[in-house]
């Protein structure tokens, strides 16, 4: 780790550095963790590297203005984010129950940040300093930059830039725009007139103030009253989130206009390497040591971020809307250097927990055209099938993993972040798959098929179930050849738009056939900024403007979730109700294909078990005899 200190969090820290006034104060809803997996750390270190004095106010007491004055009035302005997560997602489960722990707070304690933290913090800053420039960013602001459906209030809210009263909103990955904004402010420009920076949003009074070509999308008033208009607006936002071909977007909010400049171009590999080479302390601030530490660091301390962006475009994921579809990655040298640094940590035990990003096995843009022409407007790279122009190549990633596992003091290098199994299956060479299974799986490989119903997968933007089946078969074949016993843990989702009771039953039958019961099931969570959330709210697929079935009632969502864990005795009544409602009584009984036994049936359990054992034993013996025949023929 470096000898540099953490950035100032108190007046005494400023005095120790010989600073009378800061250039920027960054207010965040997370505890202060100086690690590049935390947005606060990246933005503050990037500004420091650009020559600016930055201080951190982490998790201030928002009930008064006092804590916001802790570091004095900054010379250029305040930066505000809610933390690494949307504050509402951080606080509430999909069933809208308050979570028990906040992993981004000391000791995992809840209640150290407010709901809608960005808005609350901005209001307090305005109380304290009135006209001082305020710039908001991070995931919460980025994904709420337009009028958006809010699941927790079950209504459409205005752009967070309007509600917060901030001057500028930075969306996406903010390293370049935040420095450009800082330079403009430092040169004496009024923040109200800094309107040219890509990757930012601002407010104007009249469309006559715009000089560039723009697309006006349905207004806040229209989208809050008309779901068809909401879907139309989202479709335009979805299509224009490209730094090459994207247009300026405008949305009226009462008597003001929200303007979104086109997205920033991705950082070059050299720029990304520079960001990750800055003097992060790679840990939480020492003040949290006595408060129970910050749990979130444990997930990333021995992991390496290798890339950004994703061309997978899953409908329920906000990565496309935040990081974009053009993948950027760090150089091999940069990653190897970080790995060597990790091996020097006193608590390092020889295991790199992960090397990846939103999708671990994406290291470069999907095709050569993306950087020149942008990502295709009405076509996906992997759905419904891999595009013929897709550059499928694991060579660079594989070479990186090989070098990492040869470094001194490294016993194992695991890959635990998302792997696109359809991209692996599209690779004509098996080299990566074989070495992944042999060297980089920790007994269990986690992948995300999400569902098997073709109807549901269509709305999810995920590959057909047959692709996952082929992946599973290949995974187990490779393990058998290697003499390993490793397993696949599939992530599955219930109640996604398009999922009916029938499709949930189809998934339950699939789980029966592969003899797998998931320990956990994710109920679809309508978070801001995703295509699936737009479907959930409007009942329309914005891509086609056609109706889509949305399971919304508590009872049906409970039944869909229970079906995926039908073996759990606690779920019996829900599964029974679901099967009766779907007229699938054929799945209630004692046959091998049945999901549950009949209600109140007095047939002895021993007889049922014996019957099933005979059938399964017969199946096993037949398979064993066939294998013997094959061996005899080979001899």
Image (cartoon, rainbow, N blue to C red):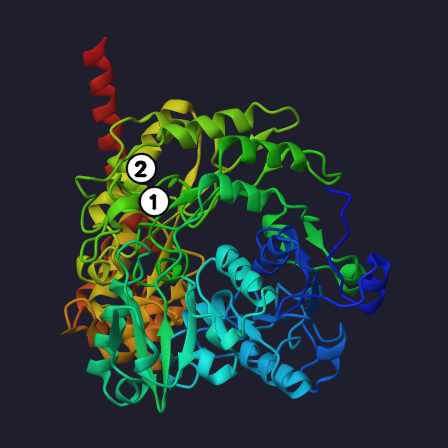
Estimate the spatial distance between the alpha carbons at disc 2 and disc 1, rounded to whole Å.
7 Å
Q: Is residue 500 left or right of residue 181?
A: left
Residue plotted at (67% across, 48% down): 280
Instruction: Please tell me the numbered disc located at residue 420.
Output: 1
Q: Position of residue 519 (x, y in %)?
A: 45, 57
Q: Position of residue 615 (x, y in %)?
A: 25, 44
Between 300 and 262, the residue placed more toward the observer is 262
Residue plotted at (55% across, 76% down): 118
Q: Position of residue 441 (x, y in %)?
A: 47, 36
The C terminus sits in image quarter: top left
Q: Are discs 2 and 1 less than 8 Å apart at CB?
A: yes
Q: Helix or strand or loop: what does disc 1 sit on?
A: loop
User: Do we see residue 48 in this rendering?
Assistant: yes
Instruction: Please tell me the numbered disc located at residue 424.
Output: 2
Between 184 and 315, the residue placed more toward the observer is 184
Whether 371 is drawn above or below 554: the answer is above
Find residue 598 and report its image quarter. Answer: bottom left
Whether 336 is drawn above or below 282: the answer is above
Residue plotted at (25% across, 57% down): 461
């Amino acid at each position: 780790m470096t000898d540099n200190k953490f950035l100032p969090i108190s007046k005494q820290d400023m005095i120790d550095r010989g600073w009378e006034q800061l250039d920027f104060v960054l207010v965040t809803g997370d505890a202060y963790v100086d690690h590049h997996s935390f947005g606060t750390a990246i933005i503050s270190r990037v500004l420091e590297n650009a020559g600016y004095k930055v201080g951190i106010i982490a998790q201030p007491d928002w009930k008064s203005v006092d804590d916001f004055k802790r570091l004095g009035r900054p010379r250029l302005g305040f930066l505000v984010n809610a933390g690494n997560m949307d504050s509402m997602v951080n606080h509430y489960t999909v069933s809208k129950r308050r979570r028990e722990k906040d992993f981004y707070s000391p000791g995992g304690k809840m209640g150290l940040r407010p709901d809608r933290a960005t808005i609350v913090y901005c209001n307090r800053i305005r109380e304290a300093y009135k006209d001082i420039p305020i710039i908001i960013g991070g995931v919460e602001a980025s994904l709420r930059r337009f009028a958006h459906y809010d699941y927790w209030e079950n209504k459409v809210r205005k752009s967070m830039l309007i509600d917060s009263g901030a001057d500028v909103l930075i969306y996406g990955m903010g390293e370049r725009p935040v420095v450009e904004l800082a330079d403009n402010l430092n040169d004496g420009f009024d923040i109200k007139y800094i309107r040219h920076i890509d990757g930012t949003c601002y407010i104007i009074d009249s469309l006559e103030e715009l000089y560039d070509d723009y697309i006006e999308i349905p207004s806040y008033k229209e989208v809050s009253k008309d779901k068809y208009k909401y879907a139309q607006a989202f479709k335009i936002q979805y299509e224009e989130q490209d730094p090459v071909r994207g247009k300026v977007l405008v949305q009226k909010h009462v008597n003001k206009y929200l303007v979104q400049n086109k997205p920033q171009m991705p950082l070059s590999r050299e720029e990304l390497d520079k960001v990750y080479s800055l003097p992060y302390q790679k840990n939480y601030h020492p003040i949290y040591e006595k408060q129970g530490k910050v749990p979130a660091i444990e997930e990333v301390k021995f992991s390496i971020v290798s890339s950004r962006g994703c061309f997978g475009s899953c409908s329920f994921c906000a990565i496309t809307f935040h990081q974009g579809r053009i993948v950027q990655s760090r150089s091999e040298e940069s990653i190897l250097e970080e790995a060597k640094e990790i091996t020097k940590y006193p608590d390092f035990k020889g295991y790199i927990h992960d090397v990846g990003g939103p999708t671990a096995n994406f290291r470069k843009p999907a095709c050569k055209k993306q950087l020149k022409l942008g990502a295709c407007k009405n076509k996906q790279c992997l759905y419904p099938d891999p595009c013929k122009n897709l550059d499928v190549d694991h060579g660079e990633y594989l070479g990186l993993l090989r070098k990492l596992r040869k470094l001194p003091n490294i016993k194992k290098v695991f890959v635990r972040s998302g792997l696109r199994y359809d991209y692996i299956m599209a690779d004509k060479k098996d080299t990566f798959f074989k070495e992944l299974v042999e060297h980089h799986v920790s007994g269990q490989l986690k992948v995300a098929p999400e569902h098997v119903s073709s109807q549901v997968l269509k709305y999810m933007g995920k590959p057909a179930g047959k692709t996952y089946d082929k992946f599973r078969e290949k995974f187990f074949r490779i393990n058998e050849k290697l003499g390993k016993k490793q397993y696949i843990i599939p992530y599955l989702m219930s109640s996604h738009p398009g999922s009916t009771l029938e499709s949930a039953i189809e998934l339950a039958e699939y789980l029966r056939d592969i003899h797998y019961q998931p320990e956990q099931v994710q109920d679809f969570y309508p978070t801001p900024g995703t295509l699936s959330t737009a479907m959930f709210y409007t009942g329309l697929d914005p891509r086609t403007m056609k109706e889509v079935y949305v399971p919304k009632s508590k009872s049906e969502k409970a039944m869909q979730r229970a079906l995926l864990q039908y073996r759990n005795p606690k779920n019996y009544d829900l599964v029974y109700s679901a099967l009766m409602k779907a007229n699938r009584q054929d799945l209630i009984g004692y046959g091998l294909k049945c999901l549950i036994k009949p209600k109140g049936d007095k047939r002895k359990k021993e007889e049922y078990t014996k019957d099933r054992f005979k059938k399964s034993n017969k199946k096993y013996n037949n398979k064993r005899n066939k294998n013997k025949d094959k061996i005899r023929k080979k001899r």
